[in-house]
Image: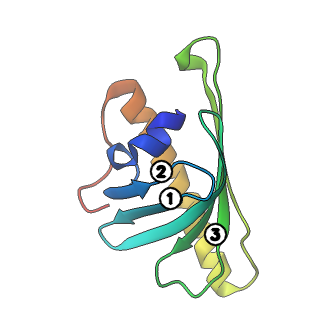
Amino acid sequence: MFDAFFRSPETWLCRNAQIDLRAGGNLRMCWPDACFEGAFVQCEPPTLARFSWRMQGDHLPDTMVVVHADPGAVPEETAFELEHYGFGVGPDWDAMYVGAARAWAGYLKNLRAVLETGVDLREADE
């Protein structure tokens, strides 16, 4: 799960990615209409990563994303958890929170589909 998340995000999450998978390393992921940039504040492959998140051109402060993978006895039993936090209060933050919650739900569903069946559920323009 960890490798799929960080080493091949183009197969399920974004269209282009540059990821320096180490504490202090930068991340940049792009979709047809937007990019996000961040940096790892904690990186412990293959189980834990914490990184900042800011959509390019956004006036709001960074939020944080934590990815935790807990490998089971066999790969099919890996527990995976994602937490996106640090949202503020107000209409701009509300829109960002709702958008992030919807996006992560859809992309994590797609990650599962790609890993289990090899099928990418995304539309061509997302």
What numbered label is drawn on residue 58? none
Can you identify the residue that label 3 sits on?
A: 97
What is the C-alpha distance between the residues marked 1 and 2? 5 Å
Q: Secondary structure at mark 2?
A: helix
Q: Secondary structure at mark 3?
A: helix
**What's the amino acid at mark 3?**
Tyr
What is the C-alpha distance between the residues marked 1 and 3? 10 Å
Between residues 18 and 32, which one lies in front from this camera angle? 18
Q: Residue at x 34, y 49 (%)?
A: 10
Between residues 108 and 20, which one lies in front from this camera angle? 20
What numbered label is drawn on residue 106? 2
Residue 23 appears left or right of 58: right
1 and 2 marks in contact (CB < 8 Å): yes
Q: Earlier in the sequence, mark 1 or mark 3?
A: 3
Can you identify the residue that label 1 sits on?
A: 103
What is the C-alpha distance between the residues marked 2 and 3? 14 Å
Residue 61 falls in image quadrant:
bottom right
- Quarter of the picture containing the C terminus is bottom left
Q: Residue at x 64, y 69 (%)?
A: 97
Q: Earlier in the sequence, mark 2 or mark 3?
A: 3
Q: Residue at x 72, y 85 (%)?
A: 90
Asked if residue 29 is positioned above or below residue 46 in the image, the reply reads: below
Q: Secondary structure at mark 1?
A: helix
**What's the amino acid at mark 2?**
Gly
Q: Residue at x 65, y 34 (%)?
A: 47
Residue 32 visible:
yes
